Image (spheres, helix red, strand yellow):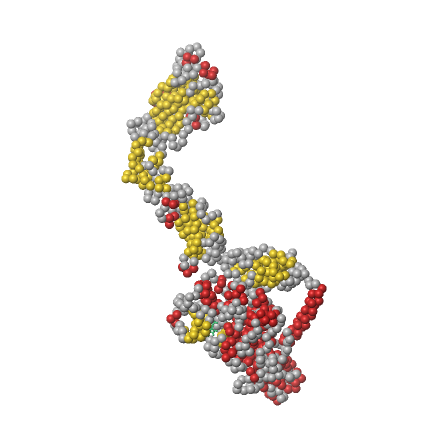
Amino acid sequence: MKTIVFTSQEYMLCSSFEMVEDHCNTECNYVNLLDSRSVMGDLGWVAYPKNGWEEIGEVDEDYAPIHTYQVCRVMEQNQNNWLHTNWILTEGAQRVYIELKFTLRDCNSLPGGVGTCKETFNMYYYETDGGELEDGDMGDGEGITEEEDRALKESQYIKIDTIAADESFTELDLGDRVMKLNTEVRDLGPLTRKGFFLAFQDLGACIALVSVRVFYKRCPFLVKSLAEFSDTIPASEASQLVEVVGRCINNSLPLYEPPRMHCSTEGEWLVPIGKCVCQPGFEEILGSCQGPPSAPRNAISNVNETSVFLEWSVPMESGGRKDIRYNVLCRQVLPDGRGLEECGPNVRFLPRQVGLSNTSVMVADLQSHTNYSFLLEAINGVSELAKDRTKQYVSLNVTTNQAAPSPVSVVRKGHAGKSSIALSWAEPDRPNGIILEYEIKYFEKEQDSSYTIIKSRETEMVVESLKPSSVYIFQVRARTSAGYGTFSRRFEFQTSPYLTATSERAQASIVAVAITLALVLLAVVAGFLLSGRRCGYSKAKQDPEEEKMHFHNGHIKFPGVRTYVDPLTYEDPNQAVHEFAQEIDVSFISIERIIGAGEFGEVCSGPLRLPGKREMQVAIKTLKAGYTEHQRRDFLWEASIMGQFNHPNIIRLEGVVTKSKPVMIITEYMENGSLDTFLKKNDGQFTVIQLVGMLRGIASGMRYLSDMGYVHRDLAARNILVNSNLVCKVSDFGLSRVLEDDPEAAYTTRGGKIPIRWTAPEAIAYRKFTSASDVWSYGIVMWEVMSYGERPYWEMSNQDVIKAVEESYRLPGPMDCPEALYHLMMDCWQRERSNRPKFDEIVCLLDKLIRNPCSLKNLVNSSHRVSNLLVEHTSVDGDCNIWSRTVSEWLDSIKMGRYTELFMEGGYASLDTIALMTSEDLRRVGVNLAGHQKKIITSIQEMRVLMNNSTTSVNI
Ligand code: AMP
């Protein structure tokens, strides 16, 4: 109930009265065609005559305007006042209802007892298909009088009823300010045209028409028995029912026959017949058939390194519910078709893994280079009902990319010297692959415009050449095949202060010794250089394994390149094997004899007959039965490395047998087996040239490996194989990984011990394995070769060896070893690894020695005796007397052959005598051209160097 406030008007000075408001929504069983109270602007009704009905603008209690039409010409005779509505559309309704709300004045309460006063009014209608009366607009008729026109219009209307007030009001009521509102409803029908007009005729009453509402009744949209019945307009006659066939709602079917309902003229649904039932798999819940949703659609993935963004569309079928959620199941695809494994707890799902309301998820922290299978499942509140849940999910296969390693989290300081700081760190939490190396960036605090980067394969490093008492900033980052991770945060460490007074004295003496040594060394090096030695090696060069890159203001000065691929960079070791090794069918191999025992099983030999290829003898390494997967991987590891090399001094891999058992590694056959046993068996049987030839081969193989960026770590005569032509080849590539993998294993080789005797001190002390440490080992191999397989340091214990080497003790020259070779060994055993020669320098020097055998004639422990090892068995003087035989060859080689006769005539018939010639001697012989003199003198000087090389004594 609401109170409406009227403004004042003659006789109608009411200020308030009560009336009922109707509110209705779509479920109402009536539809308004006109409601004068809801029309905001001009109603547009026409009053006739103009001084009859009058529109009075009122406001309701909310000050919303309402339209009222009032007439109160009770004082005058013969009233006939018409009020015409607009054209009202029927919307197809055949019967409409008109609800009038009005107030009416009690005639008796009027002053003077007015005889003409009425207490009723009439309501008319007129049907048309258009919005006009068929004879034109009211009052606009031409050629006829107003009276005639009026009569015409009125004659066209059909009377609906005379409306009387149930309640009329008196002056007393007005005084009480209470208005009595009448509500009268009339119906109209059957209507046959599209619309109609209404008209209200006043014959002399005092009326206020407060509202006019025209509506029709309908049977509203209804869902009953799982069937939908649409809005239905009833028939016009009360006795008629309209039959409506229902439509089964989603996920339901008609039971026996389509359901039906009947719509009455009152807008009520009556007499339901038949019904719908839920389809199989769906359940009737709250009047609807509900089931699990279908699978998500259009699933796509977007991989970003080790994160995957999954996106999908909503399922085709919602299951009749609005509560769809999504779950993500993450499974890793195991290699070799070994199936799927659920992703571990480290994988992150953003925003979450289950109960997702959005159609996307981010899956992060997956493994790099890995195949994953994701199941995207749509679920709702009744998913549990589903018998077959596979219909609810879709699978998506994704391969992650490689990703750089996560940052190193902590860098720790170990021992800090005045010029060095030992650092160590842990592997990054997420390496995302195999860590190939670490970069250590450092600079003096507050001097960060210039910094240094050094590299390490280990998780520790001693940073040297620092200033005493200085604070340095260190940052470490890891590198995998995917590239560098980001640097760790900055760590500040300080070097120790300068030494105290006493230690300064000690330091001074150390410096003096160092200077003396340096001067001696300088003299030696200068001697080498001045004498024109072309194979001199620079000891100042950087170690390839510890490439130091200096940056100044971000500018790289010294980058390095690597070509060897660490099989560890492959997640799947089998992939590495098959990348580098050819699979051989076992039927092409015949095992004939057992030739040795390897770490993983017997080593055999026999012919390999590959189709279309010449038969060849091969060595066959077998993996003994009952191996673990780990052992199989380690066994094949060697093949993955060997297969990458192609060099005459590296054992050649022919292929692998992995598809049948036993698993085998097939290499070229080396008739003379391992070098250490071969030398022991043939003690004293070779010329120095033959021995140097073997050493040259080993050095050449090692040069190749170091150029490839491969560090052997276990170079020893036992790991060199010798073929029937005495060609030596480097083999055994298995150990390096064991050393690298397990810090403990650094002290236990397959022989039970780290190869201490062959290993450089820095590699023993802090596992600094580099090509420079391989050079150290090479020096030991030289010693083994020149002593025919003697054990380095004989029966000394490992501990004693470590101590002795630490105290600068070095192996003595083997019996009858040319001094030139012993010098080279000693150089290989330089404590400072950057002072050791490089393999290319070693090869170069050995080549020179081979070309000039007399340079080998001075022996370390029998200095004035010509080595009988130099001598071929057939001729004692032959080799070393090459000088006398080659004067003409020598002159030819320097394009001075024209002087041969003059030299002979001058008594210079051997190179021994020529080596002593001066420029004066040359002129005397008859070499007058200055250019020729210079050329010959230079060559003579070179000759002298070669002859004197082995007599140079170096005390280091
Ligand atoms: P390994 O496992 O490489 O140490 O091999 C064990 C032993 O088998 C070696 O010491 C050699 O005597 C022998 N052997 C290995 N490979 C070959 C080969 N390619 N040719 C000849 N003998 C070999």
Residue sitting at the far left: 256
Residue 831, picture quadrant: bottom right
Residue at the spot 45% in from the left edge and 46% down from the top edge: 356
Q: Quadrant of the C terminus?
A: bottom right
From what the image shows, is residue 252 above or below residue 478? above
Residue 262 relative to residue 6: left or right: left
Q: Nearer the viewer, residue 146 or 508?
A: 508
Residue 29 placement (x, y as % from top left): 36, 30
Q: Which quadrant of the structure image shows residue 523?
A: bottom right
Q: In this orientation, does residue 101 appear? A: yes
Choose between 927 and 504: the one closer to the eye.
504
- The location of residue 600, given as percent across then percent down, is 45, 69
**Relative to the observer, which residue lies in front, 586 or 677?**
677
Query: Left or right: where does residue 185 sit relative to residue 733?
Result: left
Q: From the top left corner, tell me how far across and down residue 399 is, in percent.
A: 45, 56
Residue at coordinates 43% horizontally, 10% vertically from top-left?
Answer: 112
On-image quarter of the N terminus: top left
Q: Determine whether 926 is above or below 252 in the image.
A: below
x, y percentage for residue 191?
33, 27
- Residue at left 29%, top 27%? 239
Most distant residue in the top direction? 112
Q: Does 686 sit above or below residue 629?
A: below
Residue 579 visible in rendering: no
